[in-house]
Image: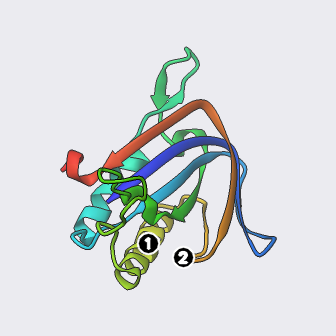
Amino acid sequence: MKFLVQIASDASVRVDGSVIGEIPFGYMVLIGVEDADTKEIADKMVKKMLGLRIFKDENGKTNLSLDQVGGSLLLISQFTLYADCKKGNRPSFTRSGSAEFAKEMYLYIIEKCKETGTNVRTGEFGAEMKVSFTNEGPFTVMLDSAELF
């Protein structure tokens, strides 16, 4: 499982020209799932993401977590995080989870985040989306379950 976490001063996602998810400040997170992932891995990834202390404190040090700054989440499913570009110029996505499984895990992650009381907005699984955001810093962190657990 991969989470690409980006601090955003604003973020939104559109489908068919309509905004379906929008946050004023927090994390814009792209979520990639592979078939080997489990709910236990998802639980650990959510805990790690929400515990990240990457917002600046009063001294300019990255020392504050999402809840400490009152941030929100915009969660977007993104199978291309598992692109394999080793051979040729056309990426392979064979490591990406099957659509049915990836959707199940994406919905599970959304619910786990909502259970924490965090303001959560989402994209639409499988839809052609237009994602816009302003990356603060810029600050981007890749959480990869293969490297974390």
Front residue (pair 125, 128): 128
Name the side, left or right, on which 99 lies relative to 40.
right
Which residue: 42% across, 53% down?
Answer: 89
Q: Quadrant of residue 46?
A: bottom left
Reply above or below: 13 against 8. Answer: below
Q: Which amino acid, by three-letter code, is at mark 1? A: Tyr
In front: mark 1 or mark 2? 2
Position of residue 42 measured from the top left corner of the image (x, y, whole percent): 31, 64
For label 2, the crowd category at 10 Å Cα-Cα, with few meaning under 14, some 14 to 19 and many 20 or more, is some
For label 1, the crowd category at 10 Å Cα-Cα, with few meaning under 14, some 14 to 19 and many 20 or more, is many
Give the colour scheme shown. Answer: rainbow
Q: Which amino acid, by three-letter code, is at mark 2? A: Phe
Please give the label number shown on residue 98.
none
Position of residue 34 measured from the top left corner of the image (x, y, whole percent): 30, 68
| Label 1 element class | helix
| Label 2 element class | loop
Which residue: 33% across, 56% down?
Answer: 84
Q: Do tag 1 and tag 2 residues touch (Cβ < 8 Å)?
A: yes
Front residue (pair 70, 137): 137
Which residue: 55% across, 14% down?
Answer: 59
Residue found at the far top of this picture: 59
Quadrant including the N terminus: bottom left
Residue found at the far front of this picture: 88
Marks 1 and 2, how far apart at CA: 8 Å
Q: Which residue in the structure is indicated by mark 1?
A: 106
Q: Quadrant of residue 31?
A: bottom left
Position of residue 129 measured from the top left corner of the image (x, y, whole percent): 66, 67
Q: Earlier in the sequence, mark 1 or mark 2?
A: 1
Q: Which residue in the structure is indicated by mark 2?
A: 125
Position of residue 9 measured from the top left corner of the image (x, y, whole percent): 69, 40
Residue found at the far left of this picture: 149
Reply above or below: 11 against 123. Answer: above
